[in-house]
Image (cartoon, rainbow, N blue to C red):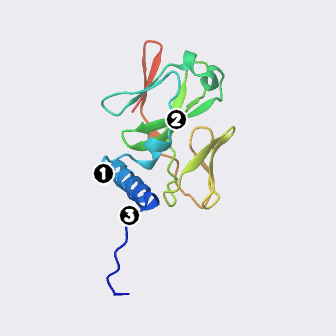
Amino acid sequence: MSDHQSRSLTRRDALRGAAALCGLSLLSLGISEAQAAAPAQTGVTLLPDGRVQVTPSRVAALKKVGGVISLPPVKGIPAALRRTGRSTYVAVSLRCPHAGAMTTPQPTGFFCSAHGSRFNESGVVTQGPATSNLPKLPVTRSGSNIIVG
């Protein structure tokens, strides 16, 4: 046998190549991890300018005070919206200010599993190592909708 053996392309090799090409295509589109992971929610709309519109009456979790939902990225920022009162809401970035890890919405606030930081319902740090609050995002009303961003 020679050093230059010919080898035919197997179906498995072709499928692997096609899968790799698809993956690279998605990366080239600039789809962020958060956007790809964010499920579509009824009552939540990503606006063309990057802000997010929420219709609380159509989102079960926001029908009660204390309810919270994760939002699609707001102008590229992973975010959550929490109902804090009868008609008041707060939106915060889900990135922990300590080291940039993602926090998780909890019934009593937000938790960063990377280093154990905790934040209250409004994003105020209650346990370190984080020393600053979760950044707040602008929240405005537009009729029966909430606009975040």
Label 2 or label 3, whichever comes before in sequence order: 3
Residue at which label 1 appears: 28
Label 1 or label 2, whichever comes before in sequence order: 1
Whether residue 7 sits left or right of residue 113 in the image: it is left
Q: Residue at x 63, y 22 (%)?
A: 60
Evaluate if marks 1 and 3 touch, with contact meaning CB atoms under 8 Å apart.
no
Residue 144, image x, y percentages: 47, 13
Q: Is residue 10 above or below residue 86?
A: below
Residue 100, image x, y percentages: 48, 57
Q: Residue at x 52, y 59 (%)?
A: 98
* Mark 1 or 2, closer to the camera: 1
The Cα atoms of the two marked residues, 1 and 2, are separated by 21 Å
The Cα atoms of the two marked residues, 2 and 3, are separated by 38 Å
Residue type at mark 3 is Leu
Q: Residue furthest front?
A: 1
Residue at which label 3 appears: 9
Residue at which label 2 appears: 39
Q: Residue at x 46, y 36 (%)?
A: 72
Q: Is residue 16 above or below residue 6?
A: above
Residue type at mark 1 is Ser
* Mark 1 or 3, closer to the camera: 3
Instruction: Give SS at disc 1.
Output: helix
Q: Quadrant of the N terminus?
A: bottom left
